[in-house]
Amino acid sequence: MGMHHGGDPLRNIPIMSDIAFPGINRSIVADDGDAFTFCSTCAFSRACLSQGMDKSSLRDLHMLVEHVGPLHAGDHVFRAGDPFEAIAAVRAGTVKTCSVDRDGREHVLGFHLPGEVIGLNGIDGDRYPCDAVALDTVTLCRFSFPRISTLAMRVPGLQQTLFKLLSRDIGTASVLAGDWSADERMAMFLVGMSRRLSARGFSPSRFQLTMGRTDIANYLRLAPETVSRVLKRFQDDGLIRIDRREVELVALPALESVAAAMLRD
Amino acid sequence: MGMHHGGDPLRNIPIMSDIAFPGINRSIVADDGDAFTFCSTCAFSRACLSQGMDKSSLRDLHMLVEHVGPLHAGDHVFRAGDPFEAIAAVRAGTVKTCSVDRDGREHVLGFHLPGEVIGLNGIDGDRYPCDAVALDTVTLCRFSFPRISTLAMRVPGLQQTLFKLLSRDIGTASVLAGDWSADERMAMFLVGMSRRLSARGFSPSRFQLTMGRTDIANYLRLAPETVSRVLKRFQDDGLIRIDRREVELVALPALESVAAAMLRD
DNA sequence: CGAACACTTGACAGCCCTCAACGTGAGTGG
DNA sequence: CCACTCACGTTGAGGGCTGTCAAGTGTTCG
């Protein structure tokens, strides 16, 4: 896993920097003295706090956190084939996970926003099965997997959190595996981004895509041209407004209706 | 989860009854006195034994096992929306997991052979997200999830096993989500069945499909007609011989070559 | 300013789905 | 034992969705 402990200040994309991570400072190592404001969007601290993790356990969790970054667009967090040693929670930016088959086609497994966890699919097997690439300026919290699973033996909330994170990823992958139309897939993608960003305090109706059309296409298993066409048609139908990578969901309910078959069976 | 503690002797399909589960008897409750031959194909006992689980922990694991079945073709193990309480290891037979979207289309998530675990995707959320249906005569071992996760806090091997099972399911679902051709999907399915059956002591080149063409089609996201056509073409090309639900993989290497892009990225 | 890149737009083709009809085998009741 | 029924599977014809190929446009960056 890349270790870029540079001293650069976090440089978020403009639309995010306005509201994201008010409590974050530039400390590179865990800050025990400020345990409860630190990493407020992190899946682990959120879950552990809500499940009554005591202060000592929380300190233990922070002891094994290793801050990584900032990485820049194109940098790898890990590569397929690297020895699996750790999982990581995205702290800022967007990470793409993907694998390249022997025909050279890239399959995007997911886009991971702040608070989401990557590397879980490496637990089974001693190596990561995919690449993880920063799409913009990314910082993350690295958790040694042997150490966090040892801690999970003492902390029920942490074990449950890990189980749930893993289980959720199964569901996400299963939904994407369904045979959906290009419209359904695209609507699902837009609504999904909206909901995830909204849950992190961003606007649900207006946001910036951090990935290119080709990445979206590889994620949705469509051709880039199809992505362009569907987006244009959505715009012509008044569902969205889109300019380059800036999206506005004009008719969210209508989009949700298109995506409904995917989002809830 | 269905509780059919009937006294019927296990009734396997012919091709399986010849070699499968030599150590299994008809006991309906856990048999502590015969701990090490019991459930030899089970993912949990295998993993726990190999990771040095002590005798006392193994007994604890057996204490929380609840045997279910035999269920018969069409019986539900659980239904989408049922409260999530337990995971289950298939002991005999085949279980299909699937969900039905609001348009009435069935999406088959997986087929689960003896030794494989179902219900893991219900951990996140308090209800099962899919149905689990017996395709033939099925028996399984039910593990209360609260109890097995509590036990996993004491038994490192068990916790690791659960993590790995969850992680593996993510990978399986992700592969299926790729944009593969009908040929690749069908070859992957046949080779996958072959490998899984082979790992359980069955013939890798000749076996009986326990699911219909429609189920295979829904699993591979193809039309049933396409399944028929591809199978016929595989037969015409000398890759397989197939009669009704009986399959013989004549040219396994060639099939693996067709499926290679899917099986290993 | 030019080159590289991302994205868009159009024409066309191919893969696979849909619809329809037929064949086949298993279970059932007379 | 046989005819009937019905589900399942096969086979054929046709069409639609989406991929492929190609060219054009706009933007970013050196």
Image (cartoon, coloured by chain):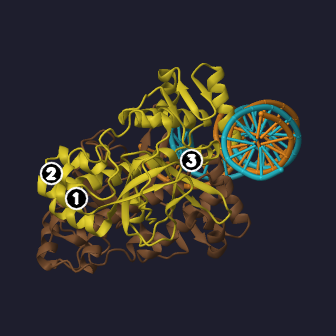
Chain colours: A brown, B yellow, C cyan, D orange
Residue at 49% from the left image edge and 65% from the top image edge: B129
Disc marking residue B61 = 1
Q: Secondary structure at mark 1?
A: helix
Q: Which mark is residue B220?
A: none
Q: Nearer the viewer, residue B67 or A201?
A: B67
Is the residue marked by circle 2 packed among few (<14), some (14-19), or many (20+) residues within 10 Å? Answer: some
Chain that bears disc 3: B
Q: Is residue B128 left or right of residue A145?
A: right
Residue A6 in view in this figure: no
Marks 1 and 2, Cα distance to the nearest angstrom?
10 Å
- Quarter of the image containing the C terminus of chain A? bottom right
Of residues A195 and C17, the one drawn nearer to the viewer in this rendering: C17
Amino acid tagged 2:
Met
Q: Residue beneath label 3, please?
A: B219
Mark in front: 3 vs 1: 1
Q: Is residue A118 visible?
A: yes
Of the two numbered discs 3 and 2 in the rendering, the one whose residue sits closer to the viewer? 2
Residue B93: where, in percent of width, then height?
Answer: 46, 46
Residue B195: image location, x then y, percent: 41, 33
| Res A153 → quadrant | bottom left
Q: Look at the numbered discs 3 and 2 and tell me whether their residues touch, using CB distance below 8 Å.
A: no
**B76, above or below A74, in the image:** below
Residue wearing tag 2: B53
Q: Mark 2: which secondary structure?
A: loop
Q: Amino acid at mark 1?
A: Leu
Confirm or deny contact between disc 1 and disc 2 (CB under 8 A): yes
